[in-house]
Image (cartoon, helix red, strand yellow):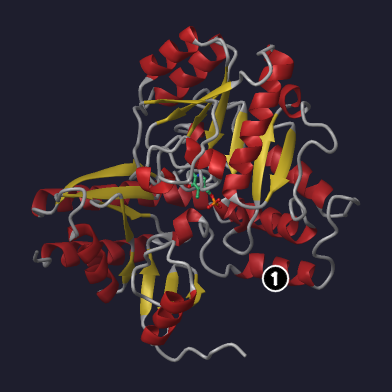
Amino acid sequence: MLDAITSSEQAIALEDKHGAHNYHPLPVVLTRGEGVYLWDVEGKRYFDFLSAYSAVNQGHCHPRIKASLLEQAETLTLTSRAFYNDILGPYEKYVTEYFGFDRVLPMNTGVEAVETAIKIARKWGHEVKGVQESEATIVVANNNFHGRTTTVISFSSDENARRNFGPYTPGFINIPYDDVEALEKVLEENPNVVGFLIEPIQGEAGVNTPADDYIPRISEACKKHNALMIADEIQTGIGRTGSLLAVCGNCSCEGHCEKQDTYIKPDIVILGKALSGGFYPVSAVLADNPIMEVIKPGQHGSTFGGNPLGAKVAMTALEVIRDEKLTQNARKLGRIFRERMESLVKKSEWVTLVRGKGLLNAIVIDQPENGDVAWRICLALRDNGLLAKPTHGNIIRFAPPLVMTEEELHICCDIIETTILNFKA
Ligand SMILES: *Cc1c(COP(=O)(O)O)cnc(C)c1O
């Protein structure tokens, strides 16, 4: 029998005793979510300003996605890809048209989709670009976050994520983020580069937002040297940054937007997180025929990848983004949020900077990287009814569900402002 939880202390003690200590959660025990709100086991209500790392862009327990999940759960959940099912095809048509690519390869978690993109790029490099076997090299940025598998942590620059997990997978070159010259140099010097794997904004690294012309210029450099631009939009995609994909630049149209001259089309796009609105692990790799066709039967797969339950949920999650104009809302509210935080920067000794795009933003706290001011500000925010978490010590990310209203956003900004102005070290 499952222990019935009656207090936060009890739940925390159970996790502490029986779970691996691979996370350091903020001490709050949540039991219910609806839209922009979360409730703890004592009944206190919070605004969610993390959105499960942008997996619940559509808000908690969205009724339409829930209905879709329940309906499909009563019909058919898993067949494996040994057989066809009647949901996967319609989903594949929908998701490829939505984002403007020929084909999709469905997976489950984000990092699996990253692994998939790496495998596709390497195979493309060996079979299409003509790189010698086992020489394919992928360029990545310093301070990247692409997930936790052995290969993916092999090219992490976070020692905590890497140390003692070796031996590491070879075939990656790290360069500084937001540095086009560094990319051009490595492309010129190394004909074995098959791709550049990049986050359009580095979420985990602290919402590192590159120069406006970074994305168009790296796209150009990749084209020039016949290397694939691989955009990891797991956190930035699906409306979060005020455009459907962060690489869409300044366009907020409702579907894919190839007709916009600001749109940069990557060769490969990786999606996860909000692709299911937080109901179920669903991820995807999108590419056009000349790239995706290097994958043939038996060469890659996943038992759960493309299952009818996940496919149905993903389709509805994307419909919600479009029908409720959540991308446009993220763009509008993001501007208001940064304006409010700019004014806080002027008033507070603790906040030095706000940065971000759409509703993916962060403030930088004036403390050394290993200080605990940002953590304690998050505890104070929690006490005042708003949940956020520091990333990289002195940075606090603010990423509420995109269903937030303007009025709610102002209430939240008031909470943040009051908390920080009253904070004492
Ligand atoms: C969260 C995230 C991942 C990993 O996704 P998981 O579902 O946790 O495996 C990869 N890349 C980026 C940019 C992410 O934010």
Mark 1, residue position: 67
Residue 368 vs residue 31, the one in the foreground: 368
Residue 312 vs residue 140, the one in the foreground: 140
Residue furthest right as drawn: 83
- Write down the quadrant of residue 193 in the picture: top right
Please report the residue visible at 51 percent of the width from the left and 46 percent of the height from the top. 147
Q: Is residue 290 left or right of residue 408?
A: right
Q: Secondary structure at mark 1?
A: helix
Please report the residue visible at 61 percent of the width from the left and 18 percent of the height from the top. 135
Q: Quadrant of the N terminus?
A: bottom right
Question: From what the image shows, is residue 308 above or below residue 97?
Answer: below
Is any part of residue 262 visible from this angle?
Answer: yes
Q: How many marks?
A: 1
Disc 1 beta carbon < 8 A from ligand 1? no
How far across and how far down the image is residue 231, in percent? Answer: 54, 33
Residue 254 vs residue 64, the one in the foreground: 64
- Write down the quadrant of residue 157 in the picture: top left
Please report the residue visible at 48 percent of the width from the left and 8 percent of the height from the top. 188
Is any part of residue 100 visible from this angle?
Answer: no
Q: Quadrant of the C terminus?
A: bottom left
The disc labelled 1 sits on which kind of residue? Answer: Ala
How far across and how far down the image is residue 254, in percent? Answer: 58, 42
Question: From what the image shows, is residue 362 above or below residue 294?
Answer: below
User: Mark 1, residues whose alpha carbon is within 10 Å: few (<14), some, or many (≥20)?
Assistant: some
How far across and how far down the image is residue 394, in percent? Answer: 23, 51
Q: Is residue 179 left or right of residue 248?
A: left
How far across and how far down the image is residue 290, in percent? Answer: 74, 21
Question: From what the image shows, is residue 226 above or below residue 256?
Answer: above
